[in-house]
Image (cartoon, rainbow, N blue to C red):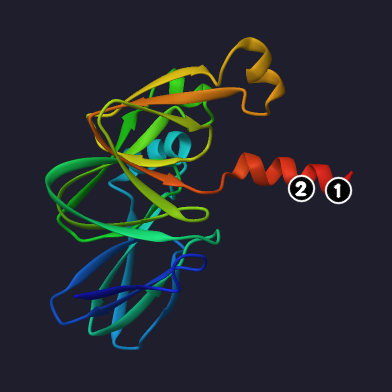
Amino acid sequence: MTPEIAGKPAFAHLRIGLQEGDRLIAESGAMASMEAGLTINTRWNGGFFRAIGRRLFGGESLFVNEFSGKGEVVLTQPMPGDMAEIDLRDTTLYLQPGAFIACEPGVNLGLGWAGFTSWIAREGLFRMKVSGQGRVWFGAYGGLIAREIEDELVVDSGHLVAYEPSIRLKLGLAGGIFSSFFSGEGLITRVRGPGRVYLQSRSFSGLQAWTNAHLH
């Protein structure tokens, strides 16, 4: 399997060349094109009940597509932005809803409780849990920023994409009461390490606010 992330950072897309015996698991609807030598098999995303749970609580599709055979498949994401590749080695990574794009068969896709802090921060009550062994590809709206956190990092709502299990989230104000509500920042997430986090340079709430301001 030979993966390549092309079009970085604004319009990243994933190109993967498969050989006989290779298999690739991808989010439903992510395929932009595939060569005729490939076979696509659609199945429940981890079984019927797990698929329903991921759809209702994790914002993921009910189904995943498994590609096999020989040829190239091109995968994209709905929003313009960057992509990243992580090689799991018996480790775990949490992905925010909608970030998952594809993985190798040795990766387990699960659903984990994110907590009310994540929900209030508009990150969702649940998060996707990827574990096991193999490569995982995920995407972001805008550019991707990887940060190693030793102590604490303040992150605005909607910018957190992925993080390691050692990371803890705590809701807070951007400053004092006056600064928090009149600076335009409001509630923020205090991300506590140690561990690695991945941030996106744009947020859907920011896009919504900009669109509403220019349509009225």
Which of the 4 image quadrants contains residue 13? bottom left
Residue under label 2: 211
x, y (%) of residue 206? 65, 42
Q: Is residue 27 visible?
A: no
Q: Nearer the viewer, residue 56 or 59?
A: 59
* Residue most extreme to the right: 216
x, y (%) of residue 79? 55, 58
Q: Secondary structure at mark 2?
A: helix
User: What amino acid type should be assigned to the residue bearing mark 2?
Assistant: Thr
Q: Secondary structure at mark 1?
A: helix
User: What amino acid type should be assigned to the residue bearing mark 1?
Assistant: Leu
Q: Nearer the viewer, residue 195 or 13?
A: 195
Which of the 4 image quadrants contains residue 6? bottom left
**Quadrant position of the C terminus in the picture:** top right
Residue under label 1: 215
Horizontally, is 135 left or right of 96 in the view?
A: left
Tell me the residue at 52%/37% (across/down): 158
Tell me the residue at 34%/62% (across/down): 26
Q: Is residue 71 visible?
A: yes
Horizontally, is 205 left or right of 108 in the view?
A: right
- Above/below status of 132 relative to 163: below
Answer whether labels 1 and 2 touch (C-beta < 8 Å).
yes
Tell me the residue at 13%/76% (across/down): 21
Residues under labels 1 and 2: Cα distance? 6 Å
- Above/below status of 88 relative to 151: below
x, y (%) of residue 123? 48, 33
Tell me the residue at 39%/54% (across/down): 63
Q: Nearer the viewer, residue 166 or 27?
A: 166
